[in-house]
Amino acid sequence: MLDIKFIRENREELKKVIKDKNANLDVEQLLELDRKRVKILREIEELKSMKNSINDLIMSAKDQTERKEIIEKGKEIKSKLEIKDPEFKKIQKAFDDMMVQVPNIISSDTPIGSSEEDNVEVEKNGKIPKFDFEPNDHIQIGKDLDILDLEKGAEVSGYRGYYVKNEGVSLMMALMMYAINKMIEKGFSPMIPPTLVKGAVLFGTGYFKSKEYNESVDEIYQVASGDKESDGSSSKEKKFLVGTAEPSLLAYYSNEVLKEKDLPIKLCGYSQCYRSEIGSYGKDTKGLYRVHEFMKVEQVILAKADINESIKLQDEMVAITKEIHEELGLPYRVLQICTGDMGLGKYRMFDLEAWMPSRNGYGETGSASNFLDWQARRLNVKYVDKNGNKKHVYMLNNTVLPSPRPFIAILENHQQADGSVIIPEVLRKWMPSNLDKISKK
């Protein structure tokens, strides 16, 4: 969310952002609601102040006539409040509904565009492999090596279900261990956060398109079964499965006031991730590229309210992910995401994509976003600066490694003519007996 004061003072800039982000919001309507909201709130506060003074006036009345007049005045005030309060609640709800649709501003270097077609390639690294044999896709490789079973996965789990088996399990877990240890080396504190969270966590981090969960647009799984509170009573809280560790990591500090000297706070989290992929029906229906559940290591930073510092931190996060791709021997490229493809809350965004031979192109393996204080306002995370002023922190996130797509890229880029797959050297210490190659049985 943006500060309403900022919106009032920067309406024209915001109108351009709304257009560039393909958002649907009428700024003038929002500001008109704001004017009505402030006006009626003042009226209510004045009435409540008058109501609070009525008892004192009654006690100090000179006679019964004056006392009666004051009582009548009190009834009049009460009657007005009974009208004003519902009116205010109605206006406040409409205002709140619009406020959550206000997009964040964008960085000066963000490309202007309407869709993913307008994203800009800013970097490309690594040598795309040229095979002297007919290469297979990860589906066939996984089947031949007996490390992947999609048929049984679909039978047991349904659409997009899968089993990883044998050395494939070691390889996938090696990716996760490598990613966690890499982040620890880079100064990030590791966590295994909750994957079952309350709706406020997902709203706070922007994973709901509006104030409440909407199953037709939010790619989130809601848990249908009821829950119990600590006293044994039925819980009324709705629970959801996260699609990444980011919401849980950032919500760890919700409703807290931090100290500037402790910033930036750098965290990484390992989690299982769940995504309904409702907006991707019919896309990437085969293999592991787009699945409902997977593992991932995520990195987040809570920083002080300094745009230049946040950009530097974001670039450092991207650099870590680039280093990871290089150490895994995966050709990759970096895309700067345009306005129309970056989402409401994002100020600046990059995607990393690894080369995948079966796609004859690159596939997304990570995404780095800078939200400034857009998420922090929703989660209510502040810090006290050196002058004693309270400010909202800036929040950033980036994928370290997801489990399926780098798995695909390793199988396809490192496949050999005999059907085996070379294990990247940085992963071998987590493989059984330091295995350097997965071969056919």
Image (cartoon, helix red, strand yellow):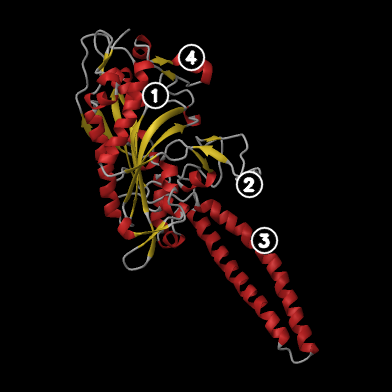
Q: Identify the mark at residue 231; answer none if there is no mark.
A: 2
Quarter occupied by residue 331: top left
Amino acid carrying label 2: it is Asp
Is 388 on the left-hand or right-hand side of 90? Answer: left
Amino acid carrying label 1: it is Tyr
| Residue found 39% across the figure and 49% down from its top | 17
Q: CA distance from mark 1 to mark 3?
A: 50 Å
Q: Earlier in the sequence, mark 4 or mark 3?
A: 3
- Element marked by disc 2: loop
Q: Circle 2: is it few (<14), some (14-19), or many (20+) Cα within 10 Å?
A: few
Q: Is residue 355 above or below residue 110?
A: above
Name the one closer to the observer, 163 or 94: 163
Q: Is residue 368 above or below residue 312?
A: above
Question: What residue would you read off at disc 3?
Answer: 86
- Element marked by disc 3: helix
How far from the left and from the top, in percent, is residue 201? 49, 46
Q: Circle 1: is it few (<14), some (14-19), or many (20+) Cα within 10 Å?
A: some
Question: What residue would you read off at disc 1?
Answer: 289
Name the one closer to the observer, 114 or 267: 267
Is 194 on the left-hand or right-hand side of 268? Answer: right
How far from the left and from the top, in percent, is residue 275? 47, 32
Q: Identify the mark at residue 152; answer none if there is no mark.
A: 4
Q: Earlier in the sequence, mark 4 or mark 2?
A: 4
| Residue found 67% across the figure and 76% down from its top | 51
Quarter occupied by residue 405: top left
How far from the left and from the top, in percent, is residue 197? 51, 41
